[in-house]
Structures are given as C-alpha cells and as structure tokens.
Image (cartoon, grey):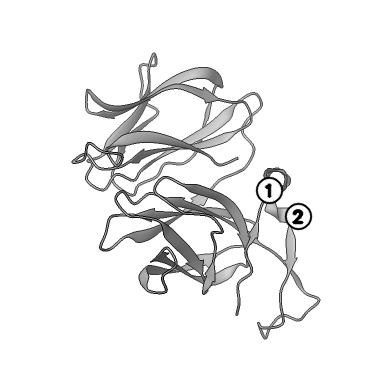
Amino acid sequence: MKTTLKKLSTIKIILSLLVLTLFVSACKKDWNNSDSVTVAGIGFVHASPGTGALDFIVDNQKANSKDFTYTNDLGYFGAYPGSRLFGIVKKDSTRYLSTANVTLRSGLFYSAFVIDVLPAPKILLVEDDLKAPETDKAKVRFINLSPDAPALDLAVVGQDAALFTGKAYKESTPFISITPSDSYTFQIKEGANVTATLPATKIEKGKIYTLWAKGLKSKTDSTKFALGILTNK
C-alpha cells in the first residue's frame, strides 16, 4: 500500500487529529474508496550528530520535501494508522541506513528521531502527548539523545529541584506543566556539574515543548554536546 503523507498545519494540530480524516485509497483490501480513517501524526527530527543530509522514508514514500539535516525538525505529517515501515537513507540515495517497523494508532501523535551515529544511525519513535496544557500553563518534557552522555538531569536556574532526573540515553520523560516565562535558563546537570545551558528561553502559555540533550561530549564542533528545544505545538 502506498502511504500518503500530508503535512499538518498548526491549526489542524490545535483542532486535533480526532477530527482530521483522509480518504484511503483502494489499495488496502479491507477498506473501500468511501471509507475514511482518522490519521496519526508523525514528526521527524534529525538527531544524529555527524550524519549528513538524509531522506526519511515511510512505506517507500519520501517524507521530506526539503533538506533534512542535523537538528532539523520537519513538523507533523498525517499518516495512515497501522503497521508502517520507516527508513532513512542518505539524501537522494536508495540504500537504507536503517529501518524500523512501527505501529501507529489513529488520533495519536509521535516523534520519529534519527539517533546514534554513522555507520549505523537508528530510528527512535516516541509518543507525543499533545493534550492542551492546564489553564495558563505550558508543558515540557526532556529526552536524552546524546549518544555518549551519561544519565542526565534537566534543571531551571533559580529553582531548587530539577524538573527531571536520571534520564539515560534514549530515555524520555512524560510532559509536565510549567509556568510560562519570557526568559527561562535551562541546564543539563550531571550530578552537581552543569554541562550544558539554554539561556533566555521563552516558554509561552498554551504551548508544548520538548527539551533535548543533543550532540557528542567528545566533540567541540557543531556536533558538540548541547541542550536544544523543539516546539511540539
């Protein structure tokens, strides 16, 4: 079956996939032309330091229409639910660097992170909770995507307790509520040591964010260890 991917706008994300439907082509025998199905939302993020431009493939269909390079976030696309084959190739290549069989559920959102390093980058699928934050709040989570980092804490300057603690490589946290601010300074800590900082970060009411440890502690170039942020909604 050819999997049709459709870019989801911010407005459609806010309205939720529960009301977004796509017509399924007749190439799947248990659906007919008039059937409609609630799609799943898929976001693609390049988090493989040192790996060049990639193409992300879903069931033999290229997902990205623009360059997909390190730290790029392509935003959400709609995809048919069920069993899907994800793959990554070097830009304009047909040779898979990695594949992953995933199961998508209708009405849910996911992020597909390209992780690890050459010669064997991999795909990590994480479910995204895009339910609206509490009134006058935002939501944040943390994911450790630094291949050579130990377990990490995420803290905020001026707050005694860390937001999240002890997240090993590839581990993600649930989303939690946070008070909006025009200028948070987030820190990654290893015990008492601050190893990365993201200063002057605006967190807006009603929005949802992923903070992520990225890069390599062994590097000092553009792939060095750092803290980044993605806006999920």
**The C terminus lies in which quarter of the figure?**
top right
Q: Quick check: 216 above or below 101?
A: above
Q: Nearer the viewer, residue 38 or 228?
A: 228
Number of the label disc, if any, that sits on residue 66: none
Residue at (41, 45) in percent of width and height: 71
Tell me the mark number nearer the camera, choosing from 1 and 2: 1
Residue 150 rendering spot, x and y as whole percentages: 22, 40
Q: Quadrant of residue 151?
A: top left
Where does the image place residue 177, in percent across and percent down from the top left? 53, 30
Of residue 177 and residue 1, the one placed in the foreground of this image is: 1
Q: Does 70 sit left or right of 27 as displayed?
A: left
Task: Rate crowding at label 1 as few (under 14), some (14 to 19) or many (20 or more) other CA atoms within 10 Å.
Answer: few
Query: What whole-number distance in Å separates the C-alpha atoms at marks 1 and 2?
Result: 14 Å
Q: Is residue 223 above or below residue 54?
A: above
Task: Assess whether mark 2 and mark 1 are in contact (beta carbons under 8 angstroms).
Answer: no
- Out of 44 and 141, give the one closest to the viewer: 44
* Residue 79 % position (x, y): 61, 64
Residue 3 screen position, x and y as percent = 60, 72
| SS label for mark 1 | loop
Please name the amino acid that badge 1 sits on.
Ser
Please rate how many residues cluster around mark 2, counting C-alpha atoms within 10 Å: few if below 14, some from 14 to 19, many from 20.
Answer: few
Q: Residue at x 35, y 47 (%)?
A: 171
> Which quarter of the picture shows residue 19?
bottom right
- Which corner quadrant of the image does residue 155 belong to? top left
Residue wearing tag 1: 9
Count the marks: 2
- Determine whether 148 is above or below 88 in the image: above
Which SS class for mark 2?
Answer: helix
As drawn, the residue found furthest toward the bottom would be 29
Q: What residue would you read off at disc 2?
A: 19
**Amino acid residing under circle 2:** Val
Give the mark nearer the N terminus: 1 vs 2.
1
